[in-house]
């Protein structure tokens, strides 16, 4: 579960603004084959883990985060383009995507958390769906799981947002390289990684020589702003006989940390005629299986 960003990716729906030379940028991300790890891979993994911890701590320390989202997904021909906005304040969240679909149609993904419920609204030309998660029950389950060292990470994954994305990347990837460079003229520290052995098998590949389906990335490239460690760019890459190609390019721009936020920005009312689906129990079973008898509250 990588939060709303990968939810959209799994639907083959998202898109980002492309780099001026996306393929050339992607080629730089080619890491050593898993069967031939670089001599300094252990040190790179250690540095990446520490950087991700620091980035997560910086993220949750901010009173608010506001940014524009730009995306290009090379999952169709032509690629899907998406624009949107991201806003968070504590556990409150608002993430909104607009995507142009083939044939001039459009779609929308909206996730809103007011601190009590997290709503997800997916709107496609021929269908719409609304789900909700009860945040209070998820937090309560986390409090009862005081013997689990990963309970904070479990909450991050359930509540989504950028903190959840960073947590998921740290739990899902093995990092091969860490280097300083620039992205969109911003000094960054870039981490290059691949899926860990457990996730590789779940995705249908071999951890030593992965051969994933065409829509599943082989490598991930995350760029953190050098001064704030904010994740300014995230790319999912696919190896092929011709090199490395870019599957998904995700960027945050016009980032504002600590700005004023209104509670009304986290309001959400389900559209008339759409019955929301409560998915709280599903998340609790996944994240806290030891509490399998927990039931989701009534709407």
Image (cartoon, rainbow, N blue to C red):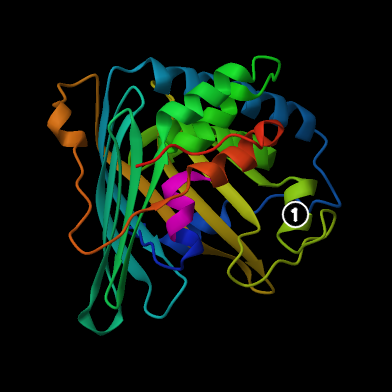
Residue 149 in picture, x, y percent from top left:
69, 19
- Per the picture, the main secondary structure of the magenta-coloured stretch is helix
The stretch of residues the image draws in magenta is 1-8
Q: Residues within 10 Å of mark 1 (few under 14, many from 20)?
A: many
> Which is nearer the eye, 249 or 258?
258
Q: Quadrant of residue 49?
A: top right
User: Residue furthest toward the bottom?
Assistant: 103
Compared with residue 270, is residue 178 higher up or lower down, i.e. above or below?
A: above
Q: Quadrant of residue 27?
A: bottom right
> Which is nearer the eye, 164 or 24?
164
- Seen in the image, is 205 located left or right of residue 163? right
Q: Residue at x 82, y 44 (%)?
A: 37
Q: Residue at x 25, y 51 (%)?
A: 84
The answer to whether one can see residue 188 in this image is no
- Seen in the image, is 149 located left or right of residue 210? left
Q: Residue at x 36, y 39 (%)?
A: 118
Residue 227 in picture, x, y percent from top left:
39, 21
- Seen in the image, is 110 located left or right of residue 221? left
Compared with residue 111, is residue 14 higher up or lower down, i.e. above or below?
A: below
> Which is nearer the eye, 199 or 229?
199
Residue highlighted by disc 1: 200
> Which is nearer the eye, 255 or 23?
255
Compared with residue 268, is residue 170 higher up or lower down, i.e. above or below?
A: above
Q: Callout 1: helix, strand or loop?
A: helix
Residue 226 in picture, x, y percent from top left:
43, 25
The answer to if 85 sits in the magenta stretch is no
User: Residue furthest toward the front?
Assistant: 298
Count of marks placed on residues: 1
Q: Split into 4 quadrants, where in the image is the C terminus?
A: top left
- Seen in the image, is 120 located left or right of residue 271? right
The answer to whether one can see residue 33 in this image is yes
The answer to if 2 sits in the magenta stretch is yes
């Amino acid at each position: 579960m990588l939060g709303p960003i990968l939810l959209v990716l799994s639907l083959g729906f998202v898109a980002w603004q492309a780099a001026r030379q996306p393929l050339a940028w992607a080629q730089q991300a080619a890491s050593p084959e898993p069967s031939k790890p670089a001599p300094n891979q252990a040190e790179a993994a250690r540095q990446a883990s520490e950087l991700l911890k620091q980035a997560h701590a910086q993220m949750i320390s901010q009173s608010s985060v506001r940014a524009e989202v730009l995306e290009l997904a090379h999952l169709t021909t032509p690629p899907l383009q998406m624009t949107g906005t991201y806003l968070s304040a504590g556990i409150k969240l608002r993430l909104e995507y607009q995507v142009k679909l083939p044939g001039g149609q459009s779609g929308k993904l909206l996730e809103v958390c007011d601190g009590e419920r997290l709503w997800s609204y997916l709107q496609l030309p021929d269908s719409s769906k609304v789900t909700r998660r009860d945040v209070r029950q998820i937090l309560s389950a986390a409090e009862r799981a005081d013997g689990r060292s990963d309970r904070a990470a479990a909450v991050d994954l359930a509540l989504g947002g950028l903190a959840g994305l960073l947590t998921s990347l740290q739990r899902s990837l093995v990092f091969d390289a860490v280097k300083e460079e620039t992205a969109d003229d911003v000094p960054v520290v870039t981490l290059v990684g691949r899926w860990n052995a457990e996730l590789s098998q779940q995705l249908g590949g071999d951890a030593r020589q992965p051969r994933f389906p065409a829509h599943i990335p082989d490598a991930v490239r995350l760029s953190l702003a050098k001064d704030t460690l904010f994740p300014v760019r995230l790319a999912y890459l696919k190896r092929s006989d011709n090199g490395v190609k870019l599957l998904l390019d995700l960027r945050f721009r016009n980032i504002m940390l600590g700005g004023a936020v209104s509670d009304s920005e986290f309001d959400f009312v389900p559209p008339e005629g759409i019955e929301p689906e409560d998915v709280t129990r599903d998340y609790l079973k996944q994240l806290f299986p030891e509490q399998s008898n927990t039931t989701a509250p009534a709407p």
